[in-house]
Amino acid sequence: MSSTANQPPNLSRGRFRSQRISRFTESVIREMTRLAMQHGATNLAQGFPDFPAPAELKRAAAEAIDADINQYAITWGAKPFRDAIAAKYRTTYGMEFDPEREITVCCGATEGMVASLLAVLDPGDEVVLFEPFYENYGPDTQLCGAVPRYVTLHAPDWNFDPEELRAAFTPKTKAIILNSPNNPTGKVFSRQELEFIAALCQEFDCLAITDEIYEHILYDDAVHIPIMSLPGMRDRTILVNSMSKTYSVTGWRVGWVLASPDLTNSIRKVHDFLTVGAAAPLQQAGVLALSLPESYYGHLSTEYRARRDHLVTSLQAVGFKCFIPRGAYYVMTDVSGFGFESDTSFVRHLIGKIGVAAVPGSSFYAHHGGGSQQVRFCFCKKYETLEKARHQFLELK
Ligand code: GLN
């Protein structure tokens, strides 16, 4: 036996920690869910419904398994599901996609976004991001060795300064990530804003990579416009979406990426080696989901609007300043009135003493001090859960 046979690996100098992940921290959103479970707190942190998925979808998934759709689908997606995606975009937006060359089914929008970025970015490329942003986009760009350039969305309306956005584009910029309806702010980008962004993408020869998972969760008079549908953007956009939020199946991990054939070719290569494919029986159930009548989507928004109003009323009653969302299912709040030192100390108090979990605003900002008096709550929950939280919030008074 050599004397080194039983040596443990040397972990001390980060020998086995790649540079790629060295700046990663645990996802704050998922950490809050963990803490909520630990403390038995009402979870208004991570955005997933605590009510059942539509019965017909559950049935379709069970039937697909029963019908032996249990082996790999084609790596870029089962043909019936890709056909259903193409049909859905034709009906909803009048947009045409070739299921053979322009659609990639993947494991949720999360994989769709990473696969797309890995397919188009090289180390050193710059990516424009609006801040506050959904926390995954930071690590996603780091995985590619790309450099994020942040542009502020200003409360209370979360508008951006066009000059600041223009200044963020440089000859190194390869893409802008656009999430509308937006997590965490609830902002829905207007046509005029999208046109401004589209013009910059064309001027600087960049791509728009969009996360449109809240497309059907809209309030008041908000309208979702895929930037891909604007003139000059069809071949310059990578559209990422998933079943998770629209059909209340966040655990299914079924998403898709729409892009012109050349881009799709690159994205499919990454996707194939990353995951091979999304769950075959759930893609089959997705055929039914994407064929649901228009009324399903109207009902979804109406339902969530009532839940939004319920949560906003409960929060305002105890002193939160709410930024009323026009889309998605989160409310960003200003908590400066409570006199806590930071968003994290306030959330610690909320979880430990009040029994409600939320997400500290700072996790949506890259710059130091950003969001330090903001907290995000989600309202994709049963009324029973929202009502319980309302009672718990009263302890804050
Ligand atoms: N999109 C959800 C949120 O922002 C879930 C995040 C996650 O854990 N993937 O809360």
Image (spheres, rainbow, N blue to C red):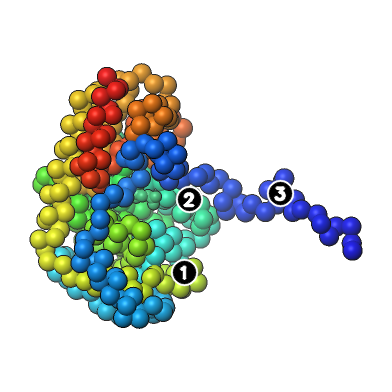
Q: Position of residue 309 (x, y in %)?
A: 16, 38
Q: Report if the beta carbon of the residue with label 2 is closer than 8 angstroms to ligand 1.
A: no
26 left or right of 88 in image: right
Seen at 46% across and 69% down, the residue is: 275
Look at the image and tell me whether residue 78 can be seen: no
Q: What label sits on residue 259 in the rendered view? A: none
Q: Compare marks 3 and 1 and give the one earlier in the sequence.
A: 3
Give the residue at mark 3: 11
Seen at 20% across and 25% down, the residue is: 317
Compared with 10, 94 (above or below) is below
| Label 3 environment density (alpha carbons within 10 Å; few <14, some 14–19, many ≥20) | few
325 left or right of 334 in image: left
> Looking at the picture, which amino acid does disc 3 mark?
Leu
Q: What label sits on residue 139 in the rendered view? A: 2
Q: CA distance from mark 3 to mark 2?
A: 22 Å
Instruction: Name the front one of labels 1 and 2.
Output: 1
Q: Dot 1 lies on which element?
A: helix
> Looking at the picture, which amino acid does disc 1 mark?
Thr
Q: Dot 3 lies on which element?
A: loop
Seen at 14% across and 69% down, the residue is: 91
Q: CA distance from mark 1 to mark 2?
A: 18 Å
Q: Report if the beta carbon of the residue with label 3 is closer than 8 angstroms to ligand 1.
A: no
Quadrant of the drawing holding the N terminus: bottom right
Tell me the quarter of the picture where residue 369 sits.
top left
Look at the image and tell me whether residue 295 can be seen: yes
Q: Report if the beta carbon of the residue with label 1 is closer than 8 angstroms to ligand 1.
A: no
> Looking at the picture, which amino acid does disc 2 mark?
Pro
Q: Compare marks 3 and 2 and give the one earlier in the sequence.
A: 3
Given residues 104 and 102, the one toward you in this image is 104
297 left or right of 242 in image: left
Give the residue at mark 1: 275
